[in-house]
Every structure is written in structure tokens, then in C-alpha cells.
Amino acid sequence: MSSNSGEIARELFAAGAERSDGNGPATGGRGPTGGTGDSTTGTKSAPKPGDHGSVHIHGMDDGDDTFSVRKFLAFCGPGFLMCIGYVDPGNFESDLQAGVLYGYSLLWVLLWATVAGLFVQAMCVRLALATGWHLARVMRDEYPPRVRYLLWIATELAIVASDIPEVIGTALALKLIFGLPTAWGVGVTSLSALLFLGLQSFGIRKLEAFIGALVAVMSICFVAQMALLGGGDGGDVLVGIIVPTIPNPNAVFIAISLLGAVVMPHNLFLHSALVLSRTFSLGERALKSAYKYNVAECALALLVTLVINFAVVIVAARSIRDVSFDDPTGTRKRAIVDRPLQNAPEMLKDVLGVAAKGMFAAALLASGQSSTITGTYAGQFVMEGFLEIRINPVLRAFLTRSAAIVPSLLVILVAGDEYAEFLIIVSSVILFVQLPFALIPLVKFCGDPAIVGKLVLGPKTLFTMRVLCGGVVFANVVLLIQMIHESGTVNGTVGGVFLGVFVTLIAVTYVASVVWLAKRPVAQNLRARVERRMRGDGGDEYDDENENAVDRELADSVGGEEMLAGVVGGTAERNAYQFRVGTPPSPLGPGGVGSGRV
């Protein structure tokens, strides 16, 4: 990676980098590429205060537990980068459809999806602070190579699926603003890599500020549109938020699309890595304080996204009710439902005036561009974490965007703009289907004291997250059954029977894979690593081989079975097993680490 384009990536994409006060060397990845820094020891210089790739926070170990606005502002940034996944063009698509078809009745889905998202993102913070690694890095050492590669492929497909709405959304925004044909707009989106290249050279704080500004644009545009509607529906809106209802069976598909568009799997990898961009002196008090500030910042960011999503649904519901057009056959309303990103702006113009159309286009463009940047970051973390491969982030952006452009462009050229937005709904469903393969490992890691130590989830929270995982899998199975039933393709014909058998095999394989992932015990033991970070006694001074030695000593001291035997090959293969040691029974009782859970 060239020095003029990879300064942020060298720090943020260092999967093995311990985040501390920057006074000592930090662990570097020891993959086949050798990482950066000393090729012999595998270590590299820790980020110093003021580095582009990190933000150093003073006073985290000062013993003051009162809430500090200064510290909170220093932690602001990662949550707002993460929250873009909650307001991308896929969200707008699902929100508009929900509002046009079902009014305010599905607002409760957005509320509880966002609340669930806060719990999930808080687990990402927990894992990152406890281990100093992001989710993909922990998963690399947890699973055998074959499983790890399959999980990586599934995650990459999810990232591509998340990029399709950004491509189509940006193209449609350019069409609304400049009259550019959609196919040309799709091609123009490939230039987003140049925007990413320019932004990353200014440092992480400037990038966070830019993304925050785009979120502000979206907020202002949709809240302004909601203000133009006037009052009168407050009671109905409140009922839609509080009372869970599914108006009819067809609403299940839209509800699941809302869930899939809000809780995205690549966000788990992204947020757990961005948390590590904050450096401070380690120690139990400092880590728990950092957890508090990170979760507070995350909650604020998600509150903003919830307001935006509510505003989109409310504006769509009121506009379709108040719009006055001659539509005896329902054709125009059907067009708005099928292609809301293309047809809703005209509806908004009829109800709210010309300014509403421009505000919608500006919000859509801001959403598409911000999602492009965060998707590129997530992809880099995933690739480096699972495979120990680091590539230029601009090249990564180009490759991901190309994979999203090809299907989008083909659909637009062959079927026309009418079917472009259907890809957005399909991508949202794909994301929801893939979510358990990132969420289940995260829950298992955060519920095991051998991985996160004293930051382990409490019993009630762990039970809640397990129920959430089960709900996601159940919703996916229901969604598959509904889609097949409505298509009418599974019937008594020979082709219908074969399709039914094929779909059944896919469903069984999916459920079996998820169950295997959930039932498989956690194999690695990061207790020694976490305890060093909790003590704050030089947690940055260990490279991977030193840490392996510590874990081997820990395993030997309790009679744990050494699982490195028989592992041959290169460094990547060795790294896949380097922490696979027996988890010793805790001397502190059933909880594993005593009290002190957060």
C-alpha cells in the first residue's frame, strides 16, 4: 500500500493492533504478507496521539466516573460511521413501501429493529475493547480454514448486496437532480473510489466529520419534509410506534425487508473495527469507561437514524393519502409501491411542492455516497481479518463497486429502470439471511468469559440476544415459505416438484448451518490477553508469538489439550489455530470472572 494513500488503512486495518496509550509497540498482523513494520518480530509502531488513523483520548484512567462531555465528544465518530447502514437507500426503499402500503402500522418494526441494533452494536464495542481485535480477526482464529473461507465468502456477498442499493440510489439521485439516465448514473458511481481516496488522506476525524455532515443533510431534508406536512396525525403515529400489528400476510415481507435493511451484517465487522480507532491507557476502569462512552455515542447515532426512518415512513404515508391525482385503476399508486425511489419524488412534489423533490434527491445522494465509504471500510476489515490480506482501500472500493455495478447495469439495460429497484429489496433480504452468520459468532464470543473476560454479557442479556438470533432464523424461514407460496412456482407439475425439493434442501442446509454455528463450542481462549488489557500492564508489548506462548503456558497449567498438533503449512494455517487451547475452569465460580459485568 502506497504511503500517500494508505495512512489510515495501516492503522485501522491492522487486525492485531492493540489500542492503548501509544507509548509502546503494538501487535501487527503476522500474515503471509508480513504486515507493516518489523518483518522479523511482526510488531509495528503504535499509533501516536494525532495520527491520522487514531484519536488519542487522555484521562481515561483518572478515576473519575462522572460523565464527561469532553470524553464523549472524543469518542464521537465510529457510531456515526456505523449508523450509515441504518439509513442507506435500501432503508429508504423499504420505508417508502411500508408507508405507502401500510401507513403508520409498521413503525413499531423500525423501533424494535433499532433497539435490537443498539444491543448488537454494543456487543461489537464489548468484543473490540476486551480483545483489542475486531470481529473478523477473532473469527479467523475461531474456525477451521474451510469454514472460515465460507464465512468470508458469505460476508463478501453481503457487502456486495449492501452496495447494490448504494449504486442504484446514487444513480436515481443523479437522475432526479441532473436528469442523467439511470444507466449512465450507475457508471458514474464507480468514481466514488476517487472520493474515498481524497477523503482518507485527511485523517479519520475529517472522514467522520464528513459522514456526520451527510447524516445531517438526510436528517434536515426528511424532517423538513415532515414539517411541511403539518400536524394532525400524532395519535395515529404513536399507535403505529407502540402497538405491534401486521395488517395482512403480505406485510410480513415488507416488515422483514425493514429488518434486513436496518440490521446489516457488515456493520458488525465495521463497528468492532472502528472502535479501535480510539487509543487510551488500558486498564479495567478505562475499558469500562470507554464502553460507556462508545455505547452512548452509538445510541445517539441510532436515535438520529430512527428519526430519519420514521420521517420517511410518515412522509410517504401522509403523501399517498393526501395526493390528488386521477387514478381509477390504481396504476399510479402501484408504480409508487413498486418503484418508490423513482416515483415517490413526484408524489412529494404534488403534495409538498417542488422543494420536497429536491430535498429527497439530496438525501438520497448523501445516503448513497456515505454508504459507499463505510462499505469500503467494512470490506477491508473483513478481507484483512479473515484472510490476512491487505490491499489498497481504493482498489478495494473499486472491486466491490464493480461487483455491484454489473448486476445493476445488466438489469437496467435489459429490463429497464422499472426493475432496478427490485434489486434493492432482494439485497435487503439477502442481508437479513446472512445476518446470523455474523451475529451468532458475536453473541457466542461476548457470552464467553474466555473471550471477553470481565466484559462478558450478563445472563439476561445473553438470553435476550440468543432469542434475537432465533427470531432472525425463524423470520428467514417464514420469508422463504411466503416467497415460494406467492410465486406459485411450486406446484404439481414436474418442474414445480423439482423446485420444491430444491428449495427444501436450501432451507434445510441453511437451518443446519446456523444450528451448527450456534451449537459449536467456542474453541479459542483469549483470557490471558484480556487480563493483560484489564491490568493495563504493557498490553502492547506482546507480539503474536509471545501471546501464543502465554496461551500455551495457560493451557499446560490447567491440563488443557494442545490443539496445535498436526497443523502444518504456512503462517496463515498456523494462525487459524494459534489460540485453540482448552478453556480452563474458572477459579472464581460459575460466572467465570466473578462480578464486574457491564
Image (cartoon, rainbow, N blue to C red):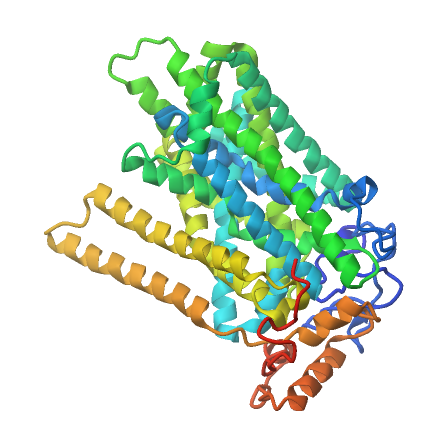
The structure residue drawn at horizontal position 58% and vertical position 63%, both measured from the top left corner, is 446
The image shows residue 17 at horizontal and vertical percentages of: 75, 64
Q: Position of residue 120 (x, y in %)?
A: 56, 52
Relative to the observer, which residue lies in front, 482 or 418?
Answer: 482
Res. 104 image quadrant: top left
Q: Quadrant of the C terminus?
A: bottom right
Q: Position of residue 392 (x, y in %)?
A: 69, 55
Judge from the rendering whether residue 243 lies leftward or rightward of residue 77; answer left or right.
left
On the image, which quarter does residue 384 sit in? bottom right
In which quadrant is the N terminus drawn? bottom right
Instruction: Please tell me whether residue 53 is drawn above or below residue 30 in the rendered image.
Output: above
Question: With 380 as the anchor, is 12 left or right in this view?
Answer: right
Foreground residue, 316 or 342? 316
Residue located at (48% from left, 42% from top): 113
154 over 172 or under it: above or below:
below
Residue drawn at point x = 34 percent, y = 40 percent: 253
Residue 304 at x, y = what percent? Answer: 61, 33
* Residue 28 in view in this figure: yes
Q: Residue drawn 40% across and 46% down?
A: 429
- 239 w.r.t. 448: above or below: above
